[in-house]
Amino acid sequence: MNGVDMGRAAADAAMAGLGLASAVDRAEAYARACWTVLAEPGDGVAGDLIARFGAEAALRIAHADDDDEWSAARARWRPRADRAAVRGALDAGRRTGATFLVPSDPRWPRRFDDLGVHAPHGLWVKGDPGRLIDASTVAIVGARAATPYGEVVAADLAADLAATGVAIISGAAYGIDGAAHRAALSTDGTTIAFLAGGVDRSYPRGHEGLLSRIAATGCVVSETPCGAAPTKWRFLSRNRLIAASADAVVVVEAGHRSGSLNTAAHAAQLGRALGAVPGPVTSAASAGSHRVLREFGGVCVTSAEDVREMLGAAVPPRQNAESRTDESSRLLDALSPRTGRSVEEIARRAGFSESDTRGLLGLADLDGRAARSEDGLWRSSRPSR
């Protein structure tokens, strides 16, 4: 990605056909598109660099050879510094009819400001980007392996809310997510899907038709560039966008360690109204929902009316609470309490350089959140949240 500086004409050409608003500076938008290729979602160092210097100047710093405070971050960005990869993402975006949205665009959802340096550098949107700033939004999330009970409740909530103008947000997965999206569509309501891979890649493949329907009336969104594949870390990072974009988050059905609890943790940290649907105490599929009620202070949701009450009950973000979007959280999400992992594997899963990973593991070891066994492998020792 040498030669990152672009003239006005070159930037106009590079970003043509990607739906940029007239007020958006094309060179800045191109730089942000580069950042979606260069950095993993939620990279706080990249976010801090961009916040301090702007996307264009930050990109020049990222490609410099200086020995400074950014050196460690460059080690993880450098392998992706490829202009051909950026060109490929932009071309794939044009082919799929995507819009590239940046913070200076009036359609940018200001709710993402609450993520601070972990906010997305840009968003790839298939469909109507204006749907992202709908007045009221509710995220309905839950297990992929949902029970009939869970799918029925999710559908009832989504249909009732969507019919009254609330935009339904979810992650397009099988189970609860799919039930919520389909129900919103059935009432001609608005629904928005956040993906962990590029918006040009339908995932899961079995929801290709559903995602097309969502894009036709709402929108499909990702912070990863077109062509990017979903990964475990990107699913976890995607969850912070679902939480941030919603006024209220409802967990319908979730196992004890479900990824939906990650979304719930982000919602609690961001001060979003949080609720969960209770299930049978004997059902493992509802164990996570009960954790939301017990450990996260979630509202017990039994009807759409309960959710409407939640929409007026958001609280300020928690102060001095452990951030679910900082680098230590990325590290901990890459660890397992049961399976030991090497520094190299943890670095790959978290998107860090190995030297950064060793430093973060040392800190996590000191405060009791990670431990290294005699075989040299690392495990999480933090209790489940």
Image (spheres, helix red, strand yellow):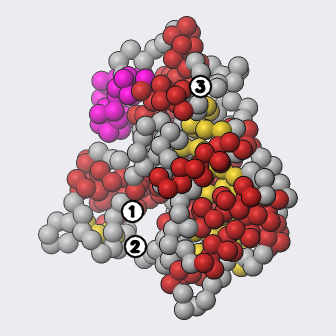
Q: Is residue 97 above or below residue 313?
A: above
- Which residue range is magenta in the image? 60-87
**Which of the pair 345/255 is nearer the observer?**
255
Magenta stretch contains residue 377: no
Alpha-carbon span between mark 2 and mark 3? 44 Å
**Pointer 2 residue:** 382
**Pointer 1 residue:** 332
Of tags 2 and 3, the one toward the viewer is 3
Q: Residue at x 53, y 80 (%)?
A: 285
First-in-chain label (2 vs 1): 1
Q: Are marks 2 and 1 in contact (CB under 8 Å)?
A: yes
Q: Residue at x 71, y 79 (%)?
A: 300
Q: Position of residue 359 (x, y in %)?
A: 29, 53
Q: Would you identify the image quadrant in which residue 187 lies? A: bottom right
First-in-chain label (1 vs 3): 3
Q: Residue furthest left?
A: 375
Horizontal relation, residue 247 to residue 236: left or right: right
**Placement of the N terminus among the 4 image quadrants:** top left
Q: Is residue 100 above or below residue 157?
A: above
Q: Would you identify the image quadrant in which residue 164 lies? A: bottom right
For the residue labelled by badge 2, is the local secondary structure a helix, a strand or a loop? loop
**Pointer 3 residue:** 18
Q: How many marks?
A: 3
Alpha-carbon span between mark 1 and mark 3? 36 Å
First-in-chain label (2 vs 3): 3
